[in-house]
Amino acid sequence: MSNNNLIGENLRAVRTRMEAAAKRSGRDPESVTLIAVSKLNPAESVETAISHGQLEFGENWVKELLEKETEVAHYLEGTNAAKSDDIKWHFIGHLQTNKVKQLIGKTVLIHSVDSYKLASVIDTESKKKDVITDILLEINIGDEESKYGIAPDEAVSFADSLKEMKNIRIRGLMTVAPICDDPEANRPYFKKMRDLFIDIKAKNNDNISMDVLSMGMTLDFETAIEEGATHVRVGTGIFGARDYGNKA
Ligand SMILES: *Cc1c(COP(=O)(O)O)cnc(C)c1O
């Protein structure tokens, strides 16, 4: 099968499984958004996905996101597949504070806010551009040494500590659950994310407007949906295995 057909087939299969998971848990399938994680895949793969109706993409590195966004926008000028304004780019990787400035205004949502410093730089840079930037707080739900993210025990007070930042809007939480072959094993973590989501939402601070729970990847997105995910981030399941090359 050509790469084009494969991406189309994969997208259809993932969407079908998402819909089934939503229905199983009594949720409206429309309430769950698929983010196609295109990191390390070329702009052509994104363009193929767009031709199959996919409009939301996730990227892990600022430079790669900006380059791909430009390339895809240029491509779309010559087609009627979609308008470049319709494409939403999510930033899902670890974000260095010195890269924030370039990213503001280029992404619909930054999923990976994991420190006070980072939140503060996003706030400052957003203020300079007179915009409010939507962010998620990244939670290290498995309390893993190797992962970025706020410890679950500190999540509520962390959210509260950002309350004076008027140019960010906390839209929800994101996590990368522990890697495992058995999606059931991550269910308790997803449940815990949902509990934290409810606790932080209850804070009602001016810059908290929570409606996003970003969790679930190729191996566990169905379990995540059953536990309340509003956004799942699927890469390999759509684009195939990635070549990390020098980024591993
Ligand atoms: C790479 C990545 C994904 C996608 O992972 P797959 O297992 O390929 O679906 C999702 N979320 C984040 C934060 C990632 O870095």
Image (cartoon, helix red, strand yellow):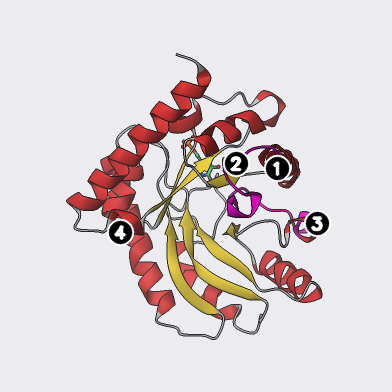
How many residues crowd around disc 3 within 10 Å: few (fewer than 14), some, or many (20 or more)?
few
Tell me the element at label 2. Answer: loop
Circles 2 and 3 in contact, beta carbons < 8 Å = no
**Residue 139 drawn at (x, y percent):** 49, 59
Give me the C-alpha separation between circle 1 and circle 2: 8 Å
Q: Quadrant of residue 219?
A: top left
Q: Earlier in the sequence, mark 3 or mark 4?
A: 3
Q: Earlier in the sequence, mark 4 or mark 1?
A: 1
**Residue 190 drawn at (x, y percent):** 34, 55
How many residues crowd around disc 2 within 10 Å: few (fewer than 14), some, or many (20 or more)?
few
For image coordinates 46% across by 22% down, the residue present is 5
Circle 2 sits on which residue?
A: 80
Give me the C-alpha separation between circle 4 and circle 1: 43 Å
Residue type at numbered disc 2: Asn
Tell me the element at label 1. Answer: helix
Please state which of the two labelled residues, at mark 2 or mark 3, is closer to the viewer: 2
Residue type at numbered disc 1: Glu
Q: Earlier in the sequence, mark 3 or mark 1?
A: 1
Classify 231 as above or below 237.
Answer: below
Circles 4 and 1 in contact, beta carbons < 8 Å = no
Instruction: Please state which of residues 71 and 59 is positioned toward the viewer in this rendering.
Output: 71
Circle 4 sits on which residue?
A: 191
Circle 3 sits on which residue?
A: 98
Q: Is residue 75 visible?
A: yes
Would residue 117 be found to the left or right of residue 230 on screen?
right
Range of the magenta residues? 78-100
